[in-house]
Amino acid sequence: MSLDTPVRFIKGVGPDLAKKLSRLGLLTVGDILFHYPVSYQDRTRATSVSDLVDGKDAFVRGEVLSSRVTEAGFGLAVFKSAVTDGKTTAWVTVWRRFNPWARYDIFSALKRDFEKGKEVFVWGRVRKRAQETEITLKEYEPAGTGSSEPATKGIIPVYPLTEGIKPVKFRKIAKAALDGYAASARDFAAASGMRPPEGLLARRRALADLHFPPSFGAYEKARRSIAFGEYLIFQTALAVSRGIITRHKKASPCRIRRNLLSGFRKNLGFEFTRAQKKAINEIFADMTSPNPMQRILIGDVGSGKTAAAVSAMLLSVENSRQAVLVAPTEILARQHFDTISKHTAGLGVNIELVTGASAAGSRRRKAANSRIASGASQIIIGTHALMENPVRFADAGVIVIDEQHKFGVAQRLNLRLKAPGADILLMSATPIPRSLAIAIYGDLDVSVIDELPPGRIPVKTMMMTDSDAYEFAKKELASGNKVFIVYPIIDPSEKLELKSASVEAERLSKEVFAGYKVGLLHGRMKSSDKLSAMESFRSGDTDVLIATVVIEVGIDVPAATLLIVEHADRYGLAALHQLRGRVGRADKQSYCVLVADSPTDDAARRLGVLLETGDGFEVARADLKLRGAGRIIGTTQHGRGELDLRIADFEKDKDILDAARRSALMMSAQGAVLPSSVRDELSRRYGDKIMMPQAG
């Protein structure tokens, strides 16, 4: 069994389960193995009932004294079982939706396993009320099932899963995948020929101990071992990519001319900040160099990254070369098109918009491709459609990739191969510290815009109940302003007790904002409907826009002064900060209201950071402390694409990360063909194009 073996060949995975796994992006054995646990539960010892702590999860072994089912009304029923550890009794409870006319008993398995006199292992959340202790059941297993150790006991991995996949089932799938992969495991870290740091494990053993650690010490050793291998491959990919870049020199470096740039600055109507000028000077220095630029521009929301990027694009056009801007969504691409068209009005620059809305073979797309190939289009703005084969640039001088974390190394390389001598500028709105940026974007130079334009009024962030938030929204609307309201899901879910955008849009339009026009925007809408909804809001036809996080990236509506985030505790810090950046884009006081009924301790800490600061760099530093580097960067998950930084800890792992970087540089600098296991891993993650320099 190899990493590329489809999941349906794993023991216990049938067609239905394979379909559910695909919703998580888990299609192969490799996807399963690299779907790492997000946390672990310590069930190494059973806790006595008298020692249970209110509000905490606990693992208990006990004997069943009695069980019963009670209808609770509202279509619900509760199964309750009295379980004793020999000294004290706890009530184990399970709530389920109840249909009295159903032909089957929804509690039949529980009734069988919790018969009087049987012993069970239970795991669940403890609630203590007066003299009664209750355990809301999450998992259980009958004792004495033939195995000496229960599957629910030990250090138990917790995986991010989807509806219809039970944790105990996924653990069995992960174990089967590990067993099947053992015979074909290839240790690319060892094959590199470089001596890894002491104490690291072979890949097969490290994966096994990461998923099912016999101890927390074994987990830490496995985590470091996986981190070394991940970083080795990532740094090797960057080194190979650098090799492709250095093979190409510019035919003619840019020369600084002021015609278009002066007109652009005049159209902007404001002066660049000190940080913008510094970044532009660094970019221009690269563009006037004979070597192609590889630079990332990092800045907070609203710091003026786009203005700096457009300056680079106009410098390319002034030197009779094309400029390309790639955005992750059609809405953002069209917004860039409108903004750049406005700020270059009267300068005689031909701008082309290419998105997925026009089919690749359509007459409109063919005409656009023809203009691009002939050089008639001087600035080309688009989505991933620009990476498709039919698009050929006449002479691309600079390529700007916005929200670069949405695009991987392989996609960047694909653009590089379309325009071998072009300058590449990436933009990131995740304002990570420079040291972390250098570690992650090792093939790039880093520019930072660390100040906001003068006169920008900071957004005020507050916590409210939803009823108070809606009253506040009415006041903003009465003043002629616009309001965003964001929900975490599109449609209602039986598993998640969350408000949904579709239901709330209908309810709010009738009950709360009856005198206003309420719109809806989410990711499942057709492209044309998304654009229509966004344009209606921007133009003023819509007063309140109900949306999901589809608005997180780059949406610019100056008239919007209030953003309400429902279930704010469900979002990460970076996502909340990005959402907050949708308001405060004009000279009016703007507000971000966070609604969270009962946040966990972790969620409360996240929300507290947003209440304390509006500085994106401070938010990123807090996020770094709370979660570590891995989950800030927004890299691709499910085992394909970018480095999986969930595993690496940039503070604790400096020694192994430095060793991995040195090994990657030595391998790529030796001039010899890379080891086959390393080549195969690079191709698996980044596609065959990454290995082109290795071919003869």
Image (cartoon, helix red, strand yellow):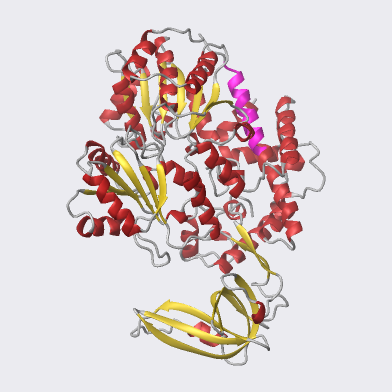
Residue at 40% x, 43% y is 460
Magenta-colored stretch includes residue 160: no
Question: Which quadrant holds residue 467?
Answer: bottom left
Would residue 275 be visible to someone looking at this image? yes
Q: Is residue 106 above or below residue 461?
A: below
Relative placement, left or right, of 320 versus 83 is left
Relative depth, front residue between 236 and 12: 236
Q: Is residue 448 above or below residue 122?
A: above
Quarter placement of the C terminus: top right
Q: Which residues are magenta?
A: 233-248
Residue at 33% x, 37% y is 331
Q: Is residue 297 above or below residue 320?
A: below
Looking at the picture, how far across and down is residue 442, in whole percent?
A: 63, 30
Would residue 544 be visible to someone looking at this image? no
Relative depth, front residue between 241 and 453: 453
Report the label total. Answer: 0
Looking at the picture, how far across and down is residue 103, in whole percent?
A: 37, 84
Relative placement, left or right, of 696 versus 70 is right
Q: Is residue 337 above or below residue 312?
A: below
Relative placement, left or right, of 219 versus 310 is right
Question: Which quadrant holds residue 291?
Answer: top right
Q: Residue furthest left?
A: 515
Residue at 34% x, 35% y is 556
Looking at the picture, how far across and down is residue 468, in whole percent?
A: 32, 57
Relative depth, front residue between 461 and 482: 461
Quarter placement of the N terminus: bottom right
Relative depth, front residue between 669 and 590: 590
Question: Which quadrant holds residue 308?
Answer: top left
Magenta-colored stretch includes residue 244: yes
From the image, give the main secondary structure of the stretch colored magenta: helix
Looking at the picture, how far across and down is residue 342, in whole percent?
A: 29, 22
Relative placement, left or right, of 275 versus 564 is right
